[in-house]
Image (cartoon, grey):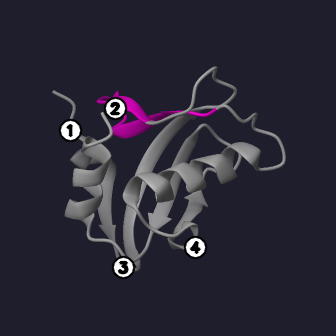
Amino acid sequence: MEDFKEAVKPHPQGLIIQFEVAPGSSELKVPSGFNPWRRTLEARLTEEPTRGKANRQLVKEVARVLGISERNVEVLSGHKSARKVLLVTGLDPDVAVYRLNSRR
């Protein structure tokens, strides 16, 4: 069974979540699955990867799913890559995993 906990790690400033995104999809789904080999969450985004649109959509959706402000979510690395690392502040890692799992 998929274990989203493997994609969520503690960080000195909060926690990090590793994502693999598919921009330009026909539907928006965050998270859309789990890649067990890369240990990343998957996300399908409707925005195209131009001028940061897909990154902004990912931040907005992750904040919504986690029930926190968008100000507490930022792309730490992978700005121009399908593999992203998000920094989330103000939330316990176990709570984040619970909320992400509830979106399956």
| Real-space CA distance between mark 1 and mark 4, rounded to the nearest whole angstrom | 26 Å
| Real-space CA distance between mark 4 and mark 2, rounded to the nearest whole angstrom | 25 Å
Kindly identify the amino acid type of the residue bearing the numbered disc 1: Asp
Callout 2 secondary element: strand
Which contiguous range is marked in magenta? Answer: 31-45
Residue at x-position 65% and y-position 41%: 81
Kindly identify the amino acid type of the residue bearing the numbered disc 3: Pro
Left or right for 94, reference 77: left
Q: Which of the marked residues, 1 or 4, is nearer the chain's N terminus?
A: 1
Residue designated by label 4 = 71
| Mark closer to the observer (1, 3) | 1
**Label 3 with label 2: CB-CB less than 8 Å:** no
Query: Dividing the picture into quarters, in which one does residue 23 lie?
Result: top right
Task: Name, please, the residue furthest toward the left.
Answer: 1
Residue designated by label 1 = 3
Q: Position of residue 92 (x, y in %)?
A: 26, 70
Residue at x-position 76% and y-position 50%: 52
| Real-space CA distance between mark 3 and mark 2, rounded to the nearest whole angstrom | 24 Å
Callout 4 secondary element: helix
Residue at x-position 44% and y-position 67%: 68
**Label 1 with label 2: CB-CB less than 8 Å:** yes
Q: Which mark is residue 12?
A: 3
Q: Which mark is residue 34?
A: 2
- Tell me the quadrant of the picture where the N terminus can be found: top left
Query: Dividing the picture into quarters, in which one does residue 60 lie?
Result: bottom right
| Mark closer to the observer (4, 2) | 4
Main SS class of the magenta portion in the image: strand
